Image (cartoon, grey):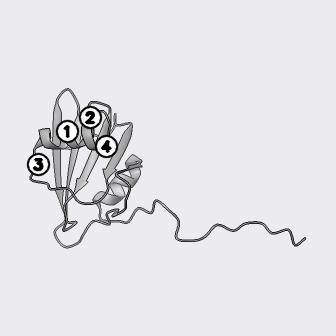
Amino acid sequence: MLNIDKVEKVYLACGYTDLRKSIDGLVMIVKNQFKLDPFEKALFVFCNKQMDKLEILHFDEGFWLYYHRLEANRFKWQITTEETLKVNVEELRWILKGYEVRTKSKFKSIKPSNCF
């Protein structure tokens, strides 16, 4: 079972990842591509190209690799130019249920005018 009580950070690997990679392959992506420490109290979340499967890399006295699959839906995954995206634990729960997590508002910010 996924124990996220002690997790401080959650990183999403934006784009697609080949989920045939083992723990060692994902650790190398975290180290070399994202320049992050795979041993920190964090979850590293990867999604496949079809956006129906996730793998979560977690270090807790050893590496854990969690696998999650949606049967009748797709994950709302970030396909951006960013390499990683930091979210909180609650947003990860939404993603695991198949909900969309907006990182940027679709609305433009309103700038005050000097009319008055």
Residue at 13%, 54% (x, y): give it: 19
Question: Neighbour class for label 3 at 10 Å: few (<14), some, many (≥20)?
Answer: few
Which mark sits nearer the N-terminus, 1 or 4?
1
Q: Position of residue 72 (x, y in %)?
A: 19, 73
Q: Residue at label 4?
A: 34
Distance from label 4 to label 3 (Cα)? 16 Å
Which mark sits nearer the N-terminus, 1 or 3?
3
Q: Is residue 70 left or right of residue 87?
A: left
Q: Residue at label 1?
A: 27
Cβ atoms under marks 2 and 3 closer than 8 Å? no
The circle on residue 21 is 3
Distance from label 1 to label 3 (Cα)? 10 Å
Name the quadrant of the N terminus: top left
Q: Position of residue 2 (x, y in %)?
A: 23, 44
The circle on residue 38 is 2
Question: Neighbour class for label 2 at 10 Å: few (<14), some, many (≥20)?
Answer: many
The amino acid type, in three-letter code, at marker 1 is: Val
Which mark sits nearer the N-terminus, 4 or 3?
3
Residue at 22%, 43% (x, y): give it: 29
The amino acid type, in three-letter code, at marker 3 is: Lys
Q: Position of residue 37 (x, y in %)?
A: 30, 33
Furthest residue toward top: 61
Instruction: Residue 115: name its quadrant.
Output: bottom right
Instruction: Residue 18: name its quadrant.
Output: bottom left
Q: Is residue 20 left or right of residue 16?
A: left
The amino acid type, in three-letter code, at marker 2 is: Pro
Which mark sits nearer the N-terminus, 2 or 3?
3
